[in-house]
Image: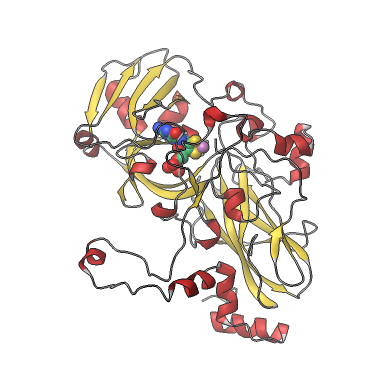
Amino acid sequence: MSRKHPSRRRFLQKGAAVAGLVASPRALEVAGGSVEAAAQVSSASVVDNNDLESVLYGRRSRFVTTTREVEGRSHSQTPRIRPNPQRPSARTPLAELVGTITPTSLHFTTQHYYGIPDINPAEHTLTVEGLVERPLVFTMDELRRLPFVSRVHFLECVGNRPNPNAATVTGTHGRMGCSEWTGVPLSVLLDEVGIRNGASWVIAEAADGGRHTKSVPLAKSLDDVIVAYGQNGEPVRPDHGYPLRLVVPGFEGIYNVKWLKRIKVVDQPYLSFQEHSRFLTPNPKTQRDSYDFGPSSVITHPSGGQRIEARGTQVIGGLAWSGSGKVSRVEVSTDGGTTYQQAELVGPALSKAHTRFALPWRWNGEETVLQSRCLDERGQLQPSEAEYAEYWGLTRGQLYGTIQSQLGHCNWIQPWKVAADGKVTNGLAPTDVVVDVHA
Ligand SMILES: Nc1nc2c(c(=O)[nH]1)N[C@H]1C(S)=C(S)[C@@H](COP(=O)(O)O)O[C@H]1N2
Ligand SMILES: [Mo]
């Protein structure tokens, strides 16, 4: 270990000495929020970790009980984008996760239409047609024989937004996850069919009840879009698009068409459900009017709903990401944004992927506000709420009273307030109305 990163033992001793307390492992674990849940289960019936079922398909410890968080009803004025009531959407429990890959079972999920189709891969095909030389229909077997890539990318719903009325980081940012996606680059398929002159867009259509359809610029389709059959080392699961989904790195989640059935090469965008014409004339000022999400980050521990049990040294940690490329730097403020310190990036900062950051911090028992901001490789810096509002000439009421997808990419800073008793709550000033749509 380098001098910059002292061993765990020295780290705890240092914290204890500074605070005059013994920083117990329990105190640190509570920051992860799992001890109480574990205590509840310990009396549950004993599961046999040696049974055949767990040998065939592994299961987690009965002491680990983290689940996705089911979404409530969406905003009443927008019934047409209300998540399917038969199968609610759900959020990723961000505060309980470590590392950067979201376990697929905990990856947020949403669908706007009639539930999740039950697709037999032996019967599923992908048609690639339109302005092409040779329209082709691919079976799943044929797709698996083509060149493939495996890339780590975040997937974020445009519904993610710092939210003064949300108690936890799952409430503010739980509509995102990060996976290793495996599949055929869309460029390979487009090469197979041969794009004709005049083509400029690709329309992707799903096999679900609502035929979810999205327009993707041809340049993006030839760049890094993946027709994915694998997620985190196994077939994409039914709620994430089995057997095939589009992965459009850095774009809003809604472009990542699940249960992908058809690709049509065309000469104009279709501007289908929830597609915005504002993207067609990008505003050079910022990412708000561009397809790519801008730079973002959020502290996941300590975060809303948690409690810091002991004074002394501990690690502030969280996630940073950008739809425009790699995270270059994350800065953390422990004084409500007056000063910032550079955090350590844990692990490689991959392009358009979640990047974990960490900063050791000594809490002296006083009230304060913690927040992070991300700088991406394009040189874009994550704005504060006030900076974002001022830049776009929006009132605070508009920031929270407008449906997220109509507002733009809501990447402003989410602060967390630490009280003198260690309780952590939302650091944004409360507001009467927050429109919250899982779009
Ligand atoms: N076919 C289809 N694809 C879809 C959707 C849908 O309703 N139907 N929802 C989109 C939205 S809004 C998001 S945020 C992502 C969510 O992907 P996930 O459920 O795998 O997390 O899928 C997108 N792809
Ligand atoms: Mo979404």
Nearer to us in this view, 236 or 285: 236
Side of 177 where 45 appears, left or right: left
* Number of residue marks: 0
Is residue 202 placed above or below 432 in the rendered structure?
Answer: above
On the image, the x and y values in percent for residue 2 come to 54, 75
Can you tell which quarter of the image residue 394 is in?
Answer: top right
Residue drawn 31% across the image and 31% down it: 188
On the image, the x and y values in percent for residue 284 come to 67, 28
Note whether residue 7 is visible. no
Can you tell which quarter of the image residue 411 is in?
Answer: top right
Q: Which quadrant is home to the C terminus? A: top right
On the image, the x and y values in percent for residue 419 come to 75, 67
Note whether residue 48 is visible. yes
Side of 27 where 421 appears, left or right: right
Residue drawn 49% across the image and 50% down it: 350
Q: How is the image coloured?
A: secondary structure
Is residue 194 placed above or below 56 in the rendered structure?
Answer: above
Residue drawn 44% across the image and 71% down it: 41
Residue drawn 70% across the image and 67% down it: 423
Is residue 73 placed above or below 40 in the rendered structure?
Answer: above
Side of 20 where 269 appears, left or right: left
Nearer to us in this view, 138 or 165: 165
On the image, the x and y values in percent for residue 381 come to 68, 45
Is residue 337 placed above or below 131 in the rendered structure?
Answer: below
- Figure quarter occupied by ligand 1: top left
